[in-house]
Image (spheres, rainbow, N blue to C red):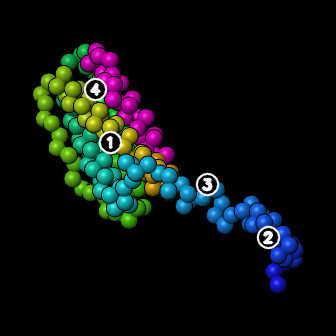
Amino acid sequence: MSSRPHDHEGAMEPQVGDAHANQYPAQPPGSAIEVEAVAPKATRVSRQELIDRLNDDLAREYQAIIAYVIYSQTLKGAAFMAVAQELESHAAQELGHAITIAKHIDYLGGTPGATPRPVKVVDNANGMLRADLENERLTIQAYRERLKQCEALEEYGIAEDLREILRQEQEHLVDLSTALGEAAPQI
Ligand SMILES: [Fe+2]
Ligand SMILES: [Fe+2]
């Protein structure tokens, strides 16, 4: 015999028992299973694909570190002294991003890669700033996509860190645009 009160009422009021059961569904609303079911398909990737994409991001961070180290020390001319200092601070921030991304790749069970994307060798200030600007633009596009993919996998901790990285990349984009005397490109 069950201890549920409606069961004691037997066949006289079966509809009451059914209504009671519907009030207490086995699967509570907002559970992980329900969230998984409504995640947009376009942003759905497997954990292995997320590891691979984060390794692409890591290669881009290595590229940014190298570019900012070289450009900050080779940018010449009094007009660019303040800009060179700005690029040096970017280099330090890109190192922080690389460490954060590598930490999450390891957490997901992957291995952080060791290869940077190629760095463009440029010998003039304008070319250096433009190469950095283009890299930042591509990086922002990539992180916006990665953020959605992390949220679709309910990896909210990684997503939180990506938001902060994305905020800094957008600052870099504005800094570079300002140095070039232009408005930041709309991405
Ligand atoms: Fe970065
Ligand atoms: Fe950046």
Q: Nearer the viewer, residue 32 or 91?
A: 32
Report crowding for label 4: few under 14, some 14 to 19, many 20 or more residues within 10 A (C-alpha): many
Identify the secondary structure beneath mark 4. helix
- Rendered location of residue 163, percent (x, y): 45, 41
Disc assigned to residue 84? 4
| Amino acid type of the residue that numbered disc 1 sits on in the rendered structure | Ala
Q: Amino acid at mark 3?
A: Gly
Residue linked to disc 3: 30
Of the image marks 3 and 1, the number of the one nearer the N terminus:
3
Could you tell me how far apart the alpha carbons at marks 3 and 2 are, in whole angstroms? Answer: 29 Å
Q: Can residue 51 be spotted in the picture?
A: no
Q: Quadrant of the N terminus?
A: bottom right
- For the residue pair 111 and 85, the one nearer the viewer reads as 111
Cα distance in 3D space between marks 2 and 4: 79 Å
**Dot 1: few (<14), some (14–19), or many (≥20) neighbours within 10 Å?**
some
Where residue 139 sits, quadrant-wise, is top left
Task: Tell me if mark 3 has few (under 14), some (14-19) or many (20+) residues whose alpha carbon lies within 10 angstroms of its own.
Answer: few
| Residue at (72, 62) in percent of width and height | 22
Q: Earlier in the sequence, mark 4 or mark 1?
A: 4
- Residue at x 63% of width, y 64% of height: 27
Q: Which residues are magenta?
A: 160-187
Quadrant location of the C terminus in the rendered image: top left
Contact flag, marks 3 and 4 (Cβ < 8 Å): no
Disc 1 secondary structure class: helix
Q: Residue at x 31, y 52 (%)?
A: 53
**Would residue 182 appear left or right of 3 to someone viewing this image?**
left
* Residue behind mark 2: 14
- Identify residue for label 1: 142
Residue type of the residue flagged with mark 2: Pro
SS at mark 3? loop
